[in-house]
Amino acid sequence: MAVSLYILIYMLYVLFRERMSRLLLPFADQQVEISSLSAGNIALTVGLKQTATGDTIVSSKSAAAAASRRAIRAEEKKEKKSEEDLVLAGVEIPEPVFFCTIEPPSVAKQTDLENALKCLQLEDPSLKVRIDPDSGQMILCGMGELHIEIIHDRIRREYGLETYLGPLQIAYRETILSASQASETLDRTINDNRHQVTAEVEVTPLTDGGLVIKYADSLRQSLLNDYKEAIANGIHSAYLTGPLLGSPLLDVGVTVHSINILAGTSATMVSACVSRCIQKALKKADKQILEPLMRVEITMGEEYLGSVLGDLAKRRGNVQEIQSRFDNKVILAFVPLAELMGYSTDLRTLTSGSATFTLELANYEGMDPQDQNTLLKKKGLL
């Protein structure tokens, strides 16, 4: 495949098209403008508005559609692909584990900040931005302290915005340990139209993650698709705010046992009733906070091994293995993210600046009751 200027290009999976305005061949800090790019070469392009890091560019809409169909079939069959059928995997986007509020220097700069963050997200898919439904504040979600600091610095340098960051917080999750049921009735009259919904749901703990929505046998055929979508929206809304910290839920299933909807009731009212019903059921269940557990790899000289191991023990670390690599020792461990705040500075102090470390999210692990109560007291929720 060769890419040329001014032709339409297509993105796999999303099937939108764009046009490049410039094509540049990089040589160190210099760029040479070219009219086309042949297979195997690397170039820079200008003019793409929606393309993000990890997207695969193809030359035609039919090629994009065919490649997408092959990828879907291969995923369903889990079979090995031939070289002719290969589809690029893209970028595996990790889940953000830190978040903080971000505010512009003035209300007049709010739109400029939103545009800057939109551009940065196209380049860095691991950066997430959301709006807090209660406070209306913009929330910046990233992979670590350094990640957030770099984004903050880039907004200042590249977009000329002096933004303000709130305290860095950890992205916890919540789950339940026991099943519970609840019912809820929502009855409102708006502009002489009565909206009435009565729902009964059950929440149950899951072991394999994800979101599972089930309906009682009597509801599967009788519910209209529009109402099923409204129920699903209500469930997803309830999943965003857990009963302990207000963190998203994980490993919780929902069964809708019954729902009675008055004719003419809006889908919005159905969603609101289901969401409130689930929140009520969650409060009745036994609850647990899940904290991000990080897979940590630390490389240091052998003379610092004892000091680093002792420090990990204080941080609730679980050492899995100690390896020897050339003249260095490598520690592989699992450590709660809450214990790694400021760890890069502490590790440099322990090892006179000679150690390096990497970390990635391993999974979410339930907190023991004592640590959970300590966290809730710290946040003023107990």
Image (cartoon, helix red, strand yellow):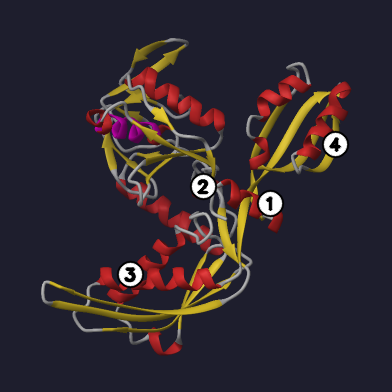
Tell which circle, 1 or 4, labels the residue nearer the N-terminal end. 4
Whether residue 238 appears in this view of the structure is yes
Q: Residues within 10 Å of mark 2 (few under 14, many from 20)?
A: few
Looking at the rendered structure, the kind of residue marked 4 is Ile
Is 279 a magenta residue? Answer: no
Is 116 a magenta residue? Answer: yes
Residue designated by label 4: 322
Note whether 190 is above or below 36 in the view shown.
below
The magenta-colored residue range is: 111-120
Q: Work out whether residue 338 or residue 147 is closer to the camera in this orientation and state it.
A: 338
In what element is the residue under mark 2?
loop
Question: Label 3, label 4: how many angstroms apart (C-alpha)?
Answer: 52 Å
In what element is the residue under mark 4?
strand
Is the residue under label 1 in contact with that under label 3 (CB below 8 Å)? no
Whether residue 230 appears in this view of the structure is no
Residue designated by label 1: 371
Viewer-side label of 1, 4: 1
The structure residue drawn at horizontal position 78% and vertical position 38%, both measured from the top left corner, is 314
Residue designated by label 2: 86
Viewer-side label of 2, 3: 3
Residue designated by label 3: 271
Q: How many numbered circles does the render carry?
A: 4
- The secondary structure that dominates the magenta segment is helix
